[in-house]
Image (cartoon, rainbow, N blue to C red):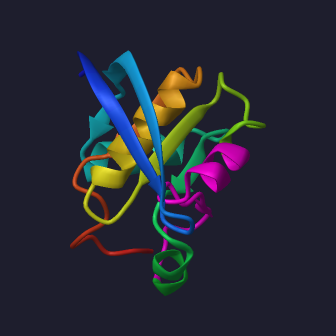
Amino acid sequence: MFYPLEMPLFLIDYSSKKPYFCFHIITIMEHIEWNKWQKAIKNDKEGFIIDVRSPDEYSENHIAGAKCFNVQNPPEFMEKINPLDKSKNYYLYCHSGNRSKQACMVMEFNGFKNVFGLKGGIENREIQ
């Protein structure tokens, strides 16, 4: 399900406390339930899993095969997504789903076509 809306995008680089602003008409990419998200990853041999939490959260637990792209550090996040193939499928998650929504919006704004967030994050889900 896609939700078109116009909204300000406000990111903060927590290392320098610098705000980053963007205002654009966007479409929030699809956020899907755990079972559907898990099946999509299993069936997508070229899909790329991105954990958008902090490196500390990532080191505590993460989904196998996921790469850590910390959305709370915008310069680092942008540096990591810029070289990626924009036509591939990307599966994003965080703890509760809020940061992955933000990351999906940023990626879509930067030309990524197939970005899927995990609805509700990995909170209360068993990591394998």
Task: Look at the picture and state if 96 lies above or below 20.
Answer: below
Q: Can see residue 25?
A: yes
Task: Look at the picture and state if 3 lies above or below 122.
Answer: above
Q: Looking at this view, name the residue that lies furthest to the bottom.
A: 60
Quarter of the picture containing the C terminus is: bottom left
How far across and down, in percent of the image, does residue 77 sit? 61, 51
Q: Nearer the viewer, residue 5 or 23?
A: 23
Q: Nearer the viewer, residue 35 or 102?
A: 102
How far across and down, in percent of the image, does residue 67 sit? 63, 61
Task: Look at the picture and state if 12 lies above or below 108.
Answer: below
Residue at the (28%, 40%) spot, across then down: 32
Residue 72 is covered by the magenta coloring: yes
Residue at the (55%, 82%) spot, across then down: 59
Residue 15 is covered by the magenta coloring: no
Exactly how many numbered labels are in the figure?
0
Q: Nearer the viewer, residue 43 or 64?
A: 64
How far across and down, in percent of the image, does residue 88 sit? 64, 29
Part of the protein shown in magenta? 61-80
Quarter of the picture containing the N terminus is: top left
Residue at the (51%, 82%) spot, across then down: 56
Tell me: 124 left or right of 65: left
How far across and down, in percent of the image, does residue 102 sit? 37, 43
Tell me: 93 left or right of 36: right
Q: Can see residue 2?
A: no
Quadrant of res 89? top right
Task: Look at the picture and state if 18 lies above or below 107.
Answer: below
Tell me: 93 left or right of 89: left
Quadrant of res 5? top left
